[in-house]
Image (cartoon, rainbow, N blue to C red):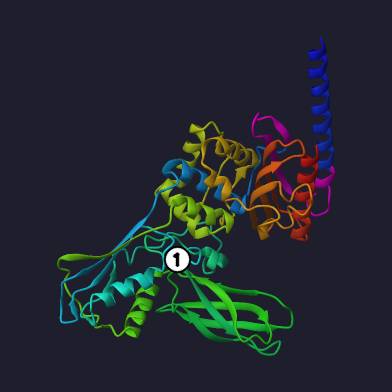
Amino acid sequence: MKSGWLFFFMLISMASALGQIRTAGRNLWGRDEVKHAAIGVCVKNVETGQIVYEHNPQMALRPASVVKLLSSALALKREGDSLTYTTKFFYTGEIDEGRLFGNIVIQAGGDPTLDSKYFPKACFIDSLVSKVVNLGIKRIHGNIIVETEGEPASIPGSWPWEDVANYYGALYHSFNYRDNTYTINLKSGKPGTQTKIVSVVPSVPGIKLRNEVMASVKNVNDAWIYGGPEAATLLIQGMIPANRSSFAVKGAMHHPDACFRAELEKRLKEKGVLLDKQRIEEGERHALLSLDSPFLKDIVYYTNKNSVNLFAEALGELISPTDYARTVKVELSHIGIDSCGITLKDASGLSPANAVPAEVFTDLLIWAKGHLSDAFVSSLPRGNVDWGLRVYSDHPVLRENVIAKTGSMSGVRALAGYLKNQKGETLAFTILVNNYVGDPVKVQEIIRDLLKDIADK
């Protein structure tokens, strides 16, 4: 009899806590910034699967970079932690008295990390230059050939035009270099005057830059690059702070093979190796160098921790090079997650046409906790540690207890991850807010306050 009463009181207690959270949620969603917004929330207990709180959990909403949870989790599911990409280098022809009568050939393997800033120890181009120099080559009577050069860039059709030429719009290729990113260094003078281009690193062959960036009295970073992958001229517009000797604006390197060849030629010349660029028929290939990428788990780490769109698109290619959206839905169905409400246009979340219900991410997080290695959970930003969660975790009950992937674009703030409540239970949560108005920090604070209320109960 006592056990029956205990169970009854537990149900009453749970219902009371759920009611309090629902009341708190209604109060939060009535605030000016979000009262007209589309909002989807789904919070479940990881161990039991029980719903802790939900609000439009099946409404398909723009998730922004939270969509990287799909590409990273499913790539690990399909390929495991330890997959690596391999890039191979050859020389053709013969070496005679310091002269190579042949070409340097690069066989791309899809590695997105070649000379990436996230993996500085790899030193890809340094290794290749050293190998050529150590062979005693002083002159190359041929060319540097990237086998996949000339392949058309594949741009998700829904990516905004204003994003494509900026660093976060870097496209994934068979051959990738330096995160497919270059830096334009600008010098600014007095407010209201036009800035000047100091340098472009690395150089971008065949591209002209039209600079219309102005110096501003405000401490702003509002300079953007415009132009498509095949454009011969790129336009830079906007404002940067006045009186700066060097201010970096980062662009998407749409032809990484051409940028790599130009830099390799420059580096070889600095070492006394000249390139004639003669057309030489390819003869027998001789192995020069073979480089393996970091493990997939390490690529996933930076995909989520730093929200690297290039890496996410590479993961999407692993999942399916031809039909990513359909394959994701099939994979989700296989693990028991309803995929009917999903629209996917890319693997990184840059597309504003993506739409995913909050419950999909929450159920994926629950599945990942039980079926993937620690590599997935370790890739998520941590409260009180990672900058992106500074507002979302700014409360004592949250700081050490929330790990989550953030997502943001115009009118969107999204968060999905794990929360440990005051009872020590682990909850999987997703909060998607679309079409808010006003200060985005206020929206982040609303999301934080909801998490605080949930953690307290």
Q: Amino acid at mark 1?
A: Lys
| Residues drawn in magenta | 27-53
> From the viewer's perspective, is residue 363 above or below residue 410?
above
- Label 1 SS: loop
Reading the image, the residue beneath label 1 is 121
The single residue placed furthest to the top in the displayed view is 1
Q: Residue at x 45, y 68 (%)?
A: 178
Q: Is residue 282 left or right of residue 231?
A: left
* Residue 309, x across and y down, in percent: 52, 58
* Residue 279, x across and y down, in percent: 20, 77
Q: Is residue 354 visible?
A: no
Is residue 29 on the magenta stretch? Answer: yes
Is residue 51 on the magenta stretch? Answer: yes
> From the viewer's perspective, is residue 241 above or below residue 355?
below
Q: Residue at x 76, y 59 (%)?
A: 441
Q: Is residue 265 left or right of residue 336?
A: left
Quadrant showing the C terminus = top right
* Residue 158, x across and y down, in percent: 53, 56
Q: Is residue 52 left or right of residue 187?
A: right
